[in-house]
Amino acid sequence: MSTSEFIPTCDLCDAHKNDSDGAFRVLPPVFRDFGQRRRFAGAVSTVKCFEDNSLVKAAVESPGQGRVLVVDGGGSLRRALVGGNLAAAAARNGWAGLVVDGCVRDVAELAACDVGIRALASMPLPTEKRNEGQRDVPVQVQGVWVRPGDWLVADEDGIVILPAPPAAV
Ligand SMILES: O=C([O-])CC(=O)C(=O)O
């Protein structure tokens, strides 16, 4: 995705603000920005897990193909689902971004990774890896449904979800 193709979230919201079918979604403004990429967009892949990042690790260690990994971590503030190693793997494997409904750690390392990273907070405690969780299932992020194959756009103003890549607005 080149910068010229990027459609800002505000423009998308202007175009869709009166939609009533629920296809256009806006995530609540509770996410902090931790990665090097301020703006990113891509097709969604999901992980649903709770205080166990085994499946997040497996996902970022596989080809990202420009997608965005959305992690439903249940909003837990008790453990970090992504740290410097996983963020570096995500950048290396071509993920456009990570959106974590939960925590991250290694903040200085995350800021140096060429990938978008949004999460609720920083928490230095890591998870226990028990290989629990689900991959590419519909998830709820802060009460908003996000499905594998949706299109996510994130920038300085927020994060929006569409059922397909947006045409020019
Ligand atoms: O492995 C973990 O649990 C997370 C982490 O610290 C890293 O990605 O560097």
Image (tube, rainbow, N blue to C red):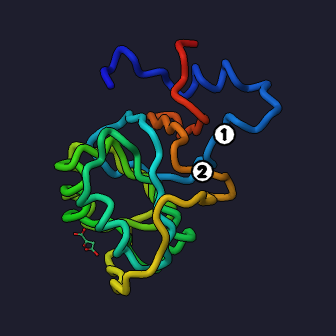
**Which label lies toward us, 1 or 2?**
2
Image quadrant assignment for residue 83: bottom left
Q: Earlier in the sequence, mark 1 or mark 2?
A: 1
User: How many numbered discs sit on the rendered protein?
Assistant: 2
Do tag 1 and tag 2 residues touch (Cβ < 8 Å)? yes
The location of residue 39, given as percent across then percent down, is 38, 33
Residue at 40% across / 46% down in the picture? 68
Which quarter is ligand 1 in? bottom left
Image quarter of the C terminus: top right
- Which of the 4 quarters of the picture holds residue 106? bottom left
Taking the spot 51% from the left edge, 37% from the top edge, the residue there is 151
Q: Position of residue 160 (x, y in %)?
A: 57, 37
- Name the amino acid type tagged 2: Val
> Where does label 2 land, which residue?
146
Describe the element under mark 2 as helix, strand or loop. strand
Q: Is residue 47 above or below residue 36?
A: below
Q: Which residue is denoted by mark 1 in the rendering?
A: 25
**Which residue is located at x 51 percent, y 43 percent?**
149
Q: Quadrant of the N terminus?
A: top left
Mark 1: which amino acid?
Arg
Q: Quadrant of residue 41?
A: top left
